[in-house]
Image: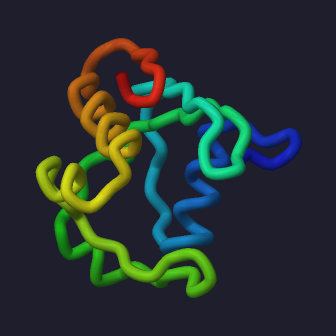
Amino acid sequence: MVEVGESPQLAVAREVQEELGLEIPVGPLLLTDWLPPWGGWDDALCLVFDGGTHPSAITETIVKQAREIRSAELCTPAQVRERCADFTARRVGAALDNLGGSPAYTESGI
């Protein structure tokens, strides 16, 4: 979540550091995804930024924020589709499809 007076790009870097203990440069915006109300939450805009390419060993340096992160690993697109909610898998797929392109817009990943 973006804090008051914080840009979305800075929020991403802060959240990744707070929840995973990783300092990763935040690249360009890949995707803006609108989500309808779901599970007691209001509708939302999700901004997906390019986090770059990293060696798989980066997972060994993760320091999980215990209240929010149970586990963290790198996944293939097929694993994302198997493990994530449909709207999350669609969002990840749309962001990957847009790597190197102009920022895209989707609604619930479509």
Nearest to the observer: residue 52 or residue 43: 43
Q: Quadrant of residue 17?
A: bottom right
- Image-based side of 19 in relation to 40, left or right: left
Does residue 19 sit above or below 101 in this rendering? below
Q: Residue 62, position in %: x, y? A: 40, 79
- Image-based side of 16 in relation to 89, left or right: right
Q: Residue 109, position in %: x, y? A: 38, 29
Q: Quadrant of residue 93?
A: top left
Q: Residue 57, position in %: x, y? A: 20, 75
Residue in view at x 24 percent, y 58 percent: 54
Residue in view at x 35 percent, y 74 percent: 72
Specify the quadrant that holds the C terminus: top left
Residue in view at x 29 percent, y 28 percent: 94
Q: Residue furthest front?
A: 39
Q: Quadrant of residue 82?
A: bottom left
Does residue 104 sit above or below 87 in this rendering? above
State the count of labels.
Answer: 0
Nearest to the observer: residue 4 or residue 91: 91
Nearest to the observer: residue 25 or residue 78: 78
Q: Residue 108, position in %: x, y? A: 45, 29
